[in-house]
Amino acid sequence: MVKKQAEYLARLRQLMAQKGIKACVISGTDPHQSENPPMHWRGREWLTGFESTNGTNGTAVVLPDEAYVWTDSRYFLQAEEQLEGTGFKMMEEDGPNAVDLVDWLTEHTNQGDTVGIDGMTFSVSYAQRLQQELNDNGVKLDTNFAMFDTIYPDRPERPKNKLFIHDEKIVGATVDEKVKEVLEQVKGELANAVLLSSLDDIAWVTNLRTAGDIAFSPIFVSYLFLSPTERILFIDKDKITKEVADHLDKYGFKVMGYDDVTTFVGNLPKETRLLLDPEKTARGVYDHVDCTPVFGGAGIAKLKSLKNKTMISNLATAMEKDGVALTKFFMMVEKEYPEGKLTELELAKRLRALRLADSSCVDESFAPIIGWNAHGAIVHYEPTEESSWAIQGDGLLLVDSGGQYVYGTTDITRTIALGTPTDEQRHDFTLVMKGHIALSNAVFPAGTTGHQLDVLARQFLWKEGKAYFHGTGHGVGFFINCHEGPQNIRLNINPTPLEPGMITSNEPGLYLSGRYGIRCENLIVTEKMMETEFGTFLHFHPMTLFPFDRSLFDLSIMSEAEIKWVNDYHALVYDRLSPLLSADEQAWMKAKTAPLTR
């Protein structure tokens, strides 16, 4: 079947021929390198027909007679399905058959060719690597090829949602305190000003949020300039309410138009040493800088990752609210499942409604991943009207979801059995849980990084020749982004150490294509455990509050310590949630958290 994307592709190729562009690289993100960009910047998605759970995953390359989309292992099955008939083919960017996009492009262009990109949707670092490798082969990079201004006539406008103030009693820090921390970081990097492009950084500094600019993240489209003498927020001014204007005025902010940022950085005094994060700043902004750029800024993201005691206390409240919503949800699933009328999409709608029934929940923290049996093996599967399956027969249901509460951001995955699970399913679930428990129980010296701990979660799968290819853990924001750096837990080397106050996910999994998927996820906070003659030692404390499916544990391959961990965790869940539940819900939770015994 030929899809409408074939027409869009023809439009692009015609424009490329007019502009003398041999190859075009199309990002899936926006000028802020957002994980989940507004619809205005989802041109890659519109062009290719590949709609990943977040809009960014997938980079397209178009040549006169070839077109490809690079994506990672979470989306291989989904991409192959959605790209059929579009004129695009999938390329794997990770796993055993990975192909490096930049290397591939240099091999498929010739001296004298021009490659075009929209520099406003590529980071400085990515564009510089691309330019360097192309230049080495005599190929020119045009960073001003804004193709969607021409070929996408009904492109959505930039979002216009109003801002609101995130209560500083919940945040536990004022804007002045945060600006002071940022400017100390700027000074430490031998700069005297900073331009923040990352939307979560800007929301964090200003204690402002919105609903609707970025799906599932209460952050807003803007830039922020800070120096010892100036604080300037670049934003579409009709997004500012009187209350927000007063908040900005209280903290000495000037407001300028969103599109004024390029002119502003071009007119900064020559002596300005402007700190820019090359991973977050758009090449199209950097091209206008006429003062001295200083690349760095990773320390600012780290400031945001260290949650204070007030935040962690409030996140505990968010987890209790989330646990109540999930109790109602899974009770409903168990009650209605025998009727055979539930579908994946219906469950997604019901879960959203249950979370948003709490007035402190502004949105979900991402599109829920609800996969029945084989759909659970699609790591980031999102049910649609076309794909949604009925929940019928025996099998495994994978539910990965979260909420954006004003008290904090939640992210949880549970895999449950409906009907009778097979011995193989119970065995595989237990392997995944053994890894989850091993990471949860880790004790490690200060300075330890996530990639040094990652093997703890994979070891039991590896011993049987099984594996998963996504990260084990990502950082989580505080009523900002569900995915937040700089820390993570994954195989890739990341120099950022885990520190007290960092919130990280713990989510090993296993995915058997065409059969079932398993993932078990809690959010954990790094805490100080002890001080010895060998230094400071840290450990993890679970924040998420909901039981794992007792029926899926194979006790024959579990140690006594592992069984004790499950029982202790379930006791914690019951103690925290039971006072918030009705009598029927309490009885259900009591059964779900009953001790495992051999």
Image: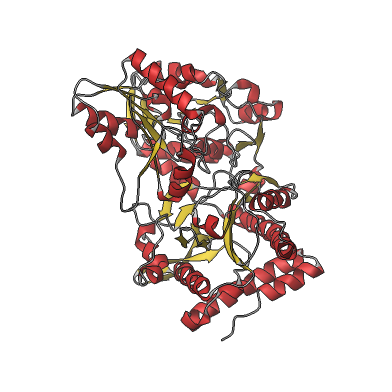
108 or 168: nearer the viewer: 108
- Most extreme residue toward the top is 18
Tell whether 579 sits left or right of 512: right
- Among the 4 quarters of the image, the one containing residue 269: top left
Tell me, yes or no, if residue 268 can be seen here.
Answer: no
Examine the rendered structure and indicate whether residue 10 appears above or below residue 80. above
Q: Position of residue 410 (x, y in %)?
A: 60, 53
User: Farthest residue in the right direction?
Assistant: 583
Q: Is residue 97 left or right of residue 569?
A: left
Give x and y (percent) for residue 111: 19, 23
Q: Provide residue 78's location: percent of width, then percent of height.
A: 48, 46
The structure's colour scheme is: secondary structure
Of residue 581 and residue 345, the one placed in the foreground of this image is: 345
Q: Can residue 483 be seen by looking at this rendering?
A: yes
Residue at the far bottom in the pictured view:
598
How many labels were placed on the picture? 0
Q: State which quarter of the image contains the C terminus.
A: bottom right
Q: Position of residue 313 (x, y in %)?
A: 62, 57
Along the line of sight, the residue nearer the viewer: 109 or 269:
109
